[in-house]
């Protein structure tokens, strides 16, 4: 498990982990050795001169004090290592997630990563801070005590050692029995969490359908399955707990009978027998705690395995020697891109000269948004090449590529913070005047004037405290502040009311001025201002040219234009 932990964390953290393990091991050995002093203490107390026990009592007290100091340092080291590793794994996970292709984030993975990044990482990192010391103590301290028993009487030591394989076998059997139920319980827990979220999000639909007082069947079924698996998991663990308890108690009973037999036969003194039995009793508590520790370790190990799987996912490859593009023209050359076995784009080729605007139109599912995502290298193409400034995007460093591109999507996500903080994401080092100018160009200043706290207004998680049009204005202001030479627009006004649409259009016009633009649009007022239009369907270009030429062709684009005009 330590190897997996180091693989997840990275080997730069190996030294503090090994140092912590070594300190905890030394602490457990010191604890076991301190109990060895009980034998001379009891021997003196039961001997002819009980006063001779004082030196041994002082030595025992000093040994216990030394153990206490080591225990404090070991626990402190564990907590410090745990917090350091927790910070490290969050940084590593965040950096890795930022480099994974967007296609990796399907609906199931988003929920899984969100749970993993919160509860999962904390549980996995609890190994160092909370579980490692009890595990080392429960393993090393009894082993040290058995060695001490051998030193005083080999027969008692051998009897105690005989319990070790029995305890190990029970632990291994319990782990195997619990593996399947632990995995199923995690899966059911994940499903139940998803159903709860679905139930909360579905409240408008349920209430509109008059089902507010009914139970939600899918959620009920999911919770019942979770209850069933949890009960089965508890029952599966019970034989291991009972078996471990019986094995430890049986070992103690054997030692008691053997000690009595040896004492009655004169082979060992009563004081030694009593001391060894005290040592054996001290072994019992950590051994009995192994069942609880084992369950916690299995949970942490499963989270580590999931974390390891995420960190093992292949990110988009960074070029060994990045190339800086000289210009801002765009080109697709024989691009084919597949998703879930289906060709989304098929041998697609087009170019956008520097400073010109290309509009992409077509039915839903034609691959329009995929074109924008390939330009931003959210995915890598399966064949062909996407070029920016004459350079394949795969040969451009990610930071250099994104510095050249400003993206405005239809669904705008804002972070839980102030309006100013969200605008500054476009360029964090921008001056106050630049931020205000970008807001004015996007007509965001009109929104800010209406809000009681102005720029300091909190937008809520995802921007939920703002309307769709207000969020879109923040997004445009952010893109204007970034001042990138290439602009990608994806259906930015398709769901806005007329007032917000007019304001957003003005902001978009300012954003597009003098830049290379690729826009996906359904609204024809946006398409008409493009230098060139391509009609995309089935991942292929069926028609291309300027708006007037395509309308006069009376083909696919003309039909699309007429349908759109009829719906206005």
Image: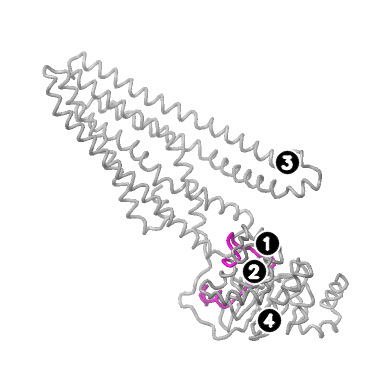
The kind of secondary structure element at disc 1 is: loop
Q: Which residue is mark 2?
A: 474
Q: Rate crowding at label 3 as few (under 14), some (14 to 19) or many (20 or more) other CA atoms within 10 Å.
A: some
N-terminal of the two: label 3 or label 4?
Answer: 3
Between circles 1 and 3, the one closer to the viewer is 1
N-terminal of the two: label 2 or label 3?
Answer: 3
Between circles 2 and 3, the one closer to the viewer is 2
CB atoms at circles 2 and 4 under 8 Å apart?
no
N-terminal of the two: label 1 or label 3?
Answer: 3
Q: Which residue is mark 4?
A: 350
Q: Which mark is residue 216?
A: 3
Can you give x and y, in whole percent of width and height, for residue 154 in the image?
A: 21, 27
Between circles 4 and 1, the one closer to the viewer is 1
N-terminal of the two: label 1 or label 2?
Answer: 1
CB atoms at circles 1 and 2 under 8 Å apart?
yes
Residue 339 falls in image quadrant: bottom right
Please, is residue 327 above or below residue 164 in the view?
below
Residue in the foreground of this view, choosing between 159 and 362: 362
The kind of secondary structure element at disc 2 is: helix
The Cα–Cα distance between marks 3 and 4, rounded to whole angstroms, is 50 Å
Range of magenta residues: 396-421
Can you give x and y, in whole percent of width and height, for residue 253 in the image?
A: 33, 20
* Residue 262 lies within the magenta run: no
Which residue: 52% across, 63% down? Answer: 314
Q: Which mark is residue 466?
A: 1
Can you give x and y, in whole percent of width and height, for residue 338 in the image?
A: 65, 67
Between circles 2 and 4, the one closer to the viewer is 2
The kind of secondary structure element at disc 4 is: strand
The Cα–Cα distance between marks 1 and 2, rounded to whole angstroms, is 10 Å
Residue 388 falls in image quadrant: bottom right
* Residue 407 lies within the magenta run: yes
Q: Rate crowding at label 1 as few (under 14), some (14 to 19) or many (20 or more) other CA atoms within 10 Å.
A: some
């Amino acid at each position: 498990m330590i190897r997996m932990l180091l693989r997840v964390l990275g080997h730069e953290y190996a030294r503090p982990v090994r140092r912590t393990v070594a300190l905890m091991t030394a602490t457990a050995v010191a604890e076991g050795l301190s109990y060895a002093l009980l034998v001379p203490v009891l021997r003196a107390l039961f001997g002819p001169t009980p006063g001779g026990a004082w030196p041994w009592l002082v030595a025992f007290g000093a040994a216990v004090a030394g153990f206490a100091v080591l225990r404090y340092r070991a626990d402190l080291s564990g907590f410090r290592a745990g917090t350091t590793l927790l910070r490290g794994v969050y940084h590593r996970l965040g950096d890795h997630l930022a480099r994974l292709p967007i296609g990796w984030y399907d609906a199931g993975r988003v929920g899984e990563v969100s749970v993993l990044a919160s509860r999962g990482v904390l549980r996995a990192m609890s190994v160092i801070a909370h579980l490692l010391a009890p595990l080392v103590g429960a393993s090393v301290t009894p082993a040290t005590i058995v060695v001490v028993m051998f030193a005083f009487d080999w027969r008692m030591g051998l009897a105690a050692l005989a319990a070790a394989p029995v305890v190990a076998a029970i632990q291994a059997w319990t782990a195997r029995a619990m593996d399947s139920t632990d995995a199923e319980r995690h899966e059911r827990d994940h499903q139940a969490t998803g159903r709860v979220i679905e139930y909360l999000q579905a409240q408008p639909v349920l209430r509109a359908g008059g089902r507010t007082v009914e139970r939600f069947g899918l959620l009920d079924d999911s919770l019942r399955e979770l209850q069933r698996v949890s009960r089965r998991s508890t029952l599966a663990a019970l034989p291991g707990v009972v078996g471990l308890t019986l094995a430890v108690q049986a070992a103690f009973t054997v030692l008691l009978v053997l000690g009595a037999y040896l004492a009655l036969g004169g082979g060992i003194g009563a004081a030694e027998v009593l001391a060894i039995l005290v040592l054996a009793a001290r072994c019992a508590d950590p051994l009995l705690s192994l069942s609880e520790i084992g369950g916690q370790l299995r949970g942490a190990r499963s989270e580590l395995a999931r974390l390891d799987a995420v960190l093992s996912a292949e990110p988009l490859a960074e070029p060994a020697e990045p190339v800086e593009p000289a210009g801002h023209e765009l080109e697709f050359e024989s691009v084919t891109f597949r998703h879930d076995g289906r060709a989304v784009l098929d041998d697609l080729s087009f170019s956008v000269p520097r400073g010109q605007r290309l509009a992409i139109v077509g039915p839903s599912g034609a691959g329009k948004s995929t074109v924008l995502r390939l330009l931003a290298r959210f995915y890598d193409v399966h064949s062909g090449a996407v070029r920016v400034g004459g350079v394949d995007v795969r040969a451009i460093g990610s930071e250099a590529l994104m510095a050249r591109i400003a993206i405005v999507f239809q669904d705008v996500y804002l972070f839980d913070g102030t309006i100013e903080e969200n605008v500054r994401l476009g360029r964090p080092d921008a001056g106050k005047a630049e931020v205000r100018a970008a807001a004015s160009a996007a007509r965001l200043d009109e929104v800010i004037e209406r809000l009681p706290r102005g720029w300091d207004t909190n937008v809520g998680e995802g921007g939920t405290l703002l309307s769709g049009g207000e969020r879109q204005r923040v997004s445009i202001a952010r893109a204007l502040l970034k001042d990138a030479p290439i602009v990608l627009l994806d259906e930015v006004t398709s769901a806005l009311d007329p007032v917000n649409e007019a304001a957003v259009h003005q902001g978009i016009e300012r954003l597009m001025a003098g830049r290379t633009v690729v826009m996906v649009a359904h609204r024809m007022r946006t398409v008409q201002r493009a230098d060139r239009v391509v009609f995309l369907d089935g991942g292929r270009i069926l028609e291309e040219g300027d708006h007037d030429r395509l309308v006069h062709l009376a083909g696919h684009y003309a039909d699309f234009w007429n349908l759109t005009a009829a719906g206005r």
